[in-house]
Image (spheres, rainbow, N blue to C red):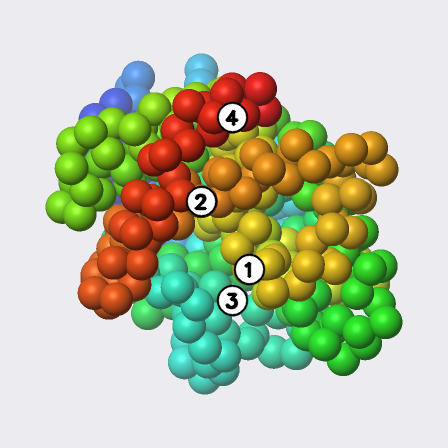
Amino acid sequence: MEKYSLTTTLQDEKIIFAVSGKIDTMNAPDLHADFVIIREQYPGKKVVFDCKDLIYVSSAGLRFFLVVNKRESEKIKLINVSHDVYERFEITGFTEILEIEKGLRDFSDKEVQNLGNSGGIEIYYVGDNLLMKVYPDGTSLKAIEFERELSHAMQMNGIPTLIIFDIVTYRGKYGLLYENLKAKTVAEVIKDTPDKTKYYAMAMGHLLKKIHSFTPNMPEIPKVSELNKNLVRGMEQWLNSDEVEAMLELVNAIPERETMLYYYFNPENIFIQNEELIIINLTNIRVGNPLFDFARAHRPYQRRPEFWKSMLYSYFGTGNIKKKEKTIEAASLLGVAFQPASYKFFRGKEMSIEKIAHSVEIARSELFPNVNQFVALFSQY
């Protein structure tokens, strides 16, 4: 007979039963008897089963949990359930009856192949069809769960993102398991097929409009206006107080919105998979006025004027967009003006002296002389 193990720990108002080994027809009655003896010593506490080391559960084992649940005044909870055991609970419908939390799968070095690093996030191949994103030390489980929740919300609202399968761990860090992206960026595709530039520019406009039609209602998502105000204040070491106040006036003139923003929406950051444009990086998601997205996009798009025009027409329609372009250019100018603070905030180091001087010169020659005009433009956007 396969032997099980049952140990207990008291934690606040809970009693945690750590069960390991196998639960089958032969030992389920003994497990139940052991449980009852211990349970009677601690009445009134919520029952939690830690199933981290439970490797198998038969139909008799399932009935054990069901009987225990029926006799408790509060629904029992199972935590750290392995993938295989969870699957058995799920197939039999027990996940609808009991409160069951799946344990996180921990990958070993031999199961993964390093693909590279993107903004501090390690990317790995897992077999042929999966990718794993592993986050830096100190990233909380709550933050990982939020990204999964955000991805699901975007998919439900028709915004194409990579499918997330599970939260996992690797070398003591949290990660997410994704479908393997077999795709190229929009920039790569139009470089190979320049005749499709207008087609994909129009597709980018449609995608951005779809993103801006979504109001996520998730307070965890940063507000881009607050971020920009902090960046402007970070310019105090290069600008005088009046100039900083003028920049704050410009940021405050842009009306608040609860719209979802991608914040790095450019051909190098959007992928094409099976002719569908797809978003893969959700760490840049913000909420705010769509003008902020266009302002950040304007600078890289200046290298592709045909692409930029086609994308704007796709987004706004074929009407007169000259005023919108003027407003976007002014907002882009504002972004250039506080770029030294942005660079320091996101990269942890200062720009070169020459580039800082260039940003300050742009602010003083093109931004501050037109503050009143730009405030009027922003307030109407």
Instruction: Please tell me how crowded label 3 is: few (under 14), some (14-19), or many (20+) other residues with Cα within 10 Å.
Output: many
For badge 3, the amino acid type reads Met
- Residue sitting at 48 percent across and 71 percent down? 123
* Cα gap from disc 1 to disc 3, whole angstroms: 29 Å
Q: CA distance from mark 4 to mark 2?
A: 12 Å
Q: Which residue is mark 1?
A: 300
Disc 4 designates what residue? 378
Residue behind mark 2? 333
Q: Is residue 161 above or below residue 71?
A: below
Q: Give the residue displayed 30% in from the left and 17% down from the top.
A: 44
Residue placed under numbered mark 3 in the picture: 132
Q: Nearer the viewer, residue 193 or 77?
A: 193
Q: Is 127 or 147 nearer to us in this picture?
A: 147
- Picture layout, residue 330 above or below residue 81: above
First-in-chain label (1 vs 3)? 3
* Amino acid under disc 4: Phe
Q: Amino acid at mark 2?
A: Leu
Q: Position of residue 351 (x, y in %)?
A: 25, 63
Front: mark 1 or 3: 1
- Contact between labelled residues 4 and 3, with CB atoms less than 8 Å apart: no
- Where residue 94 sits, quadrant-wise, is top right
Question: Which badge, 1 or 2, is on the more N-terminal residue?
Answer: 1
Contact (CB < 8 A) between labels 4 and 2? no
- Answer with mark 4 or mark 2, whichever residue precedes in sequence: 2
- In percent of width and height, residue 182 lies at 70, 72
